[in-house]
Structures are given as structure tokens and as C-alpha cells.
Image: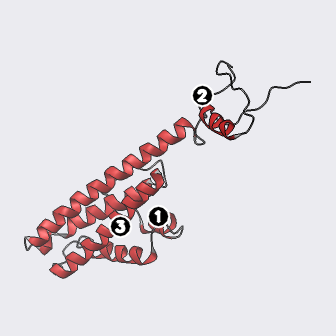
Amino acid sequence: PDSPPLHLMEQEGYRALTALLPAAPAVPDDEPFRATALPSPAGASGREKLDHQLKKAREGFDLAAKRLALAEVVLKGGFPEEVLRPIREALGWALTSFLVLYKADRDPSGDLPSPRLVQSDLVEPGRLPDDLAARLARVRELTEPAAEGESTPPPTIKVGESLAAAVMELIEVGRQRVVAEGL
């Protein structure tokens, strides 16, 4: 029995291919079973979900960069004791934004994710380089608020700059991942 042929190309691609053949078959445009376009492999809803995740992550990285910019202004103003909070908030925004790239159910925030979550979801799968993760752990430790009744010396400007540089590197790596995931 004669069965209809199966077409796996969209019309434009099929026309381009048949134009290269020596005896090009006729391609009537009015056949109703010919698709005008093929759906994307992820499907429309899958692509929309990914775009939404990328948008959330991008916005989170932007907020992290703004908090870091505040920290740099405070440092340049000569107030190293005031730099710890905005650096810690920038770290929280950057890490949670990084997690959003791989976990659709998360939202970026200024709250720091647990070290175990960062280790299992970012470092172990190779999404975050080990050396950067170690520097970020140092940022986390040094920006920890002082315990009740504890008097801690403020960081030096050099230390503040080092902490800010580690967080900026995280933001840049994250932004690069947003671009790569969006391709």
C-alpha cells in the first residue's frame, strides 16, 4: 500500500536541499500536511522556563554588582569597618543567582546559601572553580557578623579590596554562565 512520505524538514530547508538536486521534485505549497516550522526541541514552555530562570539570575547578578559597588565606594571613602555588610550581601546575591541557573525552584536573594549547598550544587559538579570557592569561603568567614559582645578589628583596606575582588570574580563567572546557558 502507498503510504505518505515522512517529511522531517521545514519548507525553506527542503526547498534549499531540493534546489541542489539535479532533478528537483515539485514541492506544492498547498499540501496541508507540510509544516511551516518545526517546534524547538525543548518546546515553547521549556524555552520560556529557561528564559525566566536566566532573567532571574541576570537580575540577581546585577543586584550583587550594585551591592559590591556600594562596598567599593565605602572602601574608597576610608571606612573599611562598614564594608563587610555590603560585601556579604553581594556574595549572597551572587551565590543564589548562580544557583538559580541550575535550580528552577530558587530565587536570588541577599541571604547566603549554606556552604554544603554551594559545595554540592556548584563546586562538585564543576560549575564553580575550586580556587574561587575557597576564596569565597574566606569572604563568608571574614564578613560574618561579630558574636554578641565580641569586639573585632575592622578589616584593612587591602583585605576589603581582596574580598570585593573575589565576589566580583563570582559575578563575572555567573554572568558568563548566563550568556552560555542562553545560547
Residue drawn at (43%, 50%) of the image: 106
Q: Is residue 26 left or right of residue 49?
A: right
Q: Amino acid at mark 3?
A: Leu
Q: Is residue 112 visible?
A: no
Q: Is residue 23 above or below residue 137?
A: above
Question: Which callout, 3 or 1, points at the residue further toward the start of the chain?
Answer: 1
How did the renderer colour the structure? Answer: secondary structure
Residue matched to label 1: 117
Q: Residue 92's x, y, as percent? A: 32, 61
Q: In the rendered view, tell whether residue 28 sits above or below residue 70.
A: above
Q: Amino acid at mark 1?
A: Leu
At label 3, counting other C-alpha atoms closer than 10 Å, the crowd grade (few under 14, some 14-19, many 20 or more) is: many
Q: Nearer the viewer, mark 3 or mark 1?
A: 3
Q: Left or right: 183 with respect to 37?
A: left
- The amino acid type of the residue labelled 2 equals Thr
Mark 1 or 2: the one toward you:
2
Looking at this rendering, what residue extends furthest in the right direction? 1
Alpha carbon separation for disc pair 1 and 2: 45 Å
Residue underneath mark 2: 36
Foreground disc of the pair 3, 2: 2
Q: Nearer the viewer, residue 1 or 106?
A: 1
Cβ–Cβ below 8 Å for labels 1 and 2?
Answer: no
Mark 3 and mark 2 lie on one chain; the one further toward the N terminus is 2
| Badge 3 element | helix
Residue 174 x %, y %: 38, 61
Where residue 63 appears, as percent x and y from the top left, is 27, 54
> Which class describes the residues within 10 Å of circle 1: few (<14), some (14-19), or many (20+)?
few
* Side of 144 where 39 appears, left or right: right
Residue, disc 3 = 170
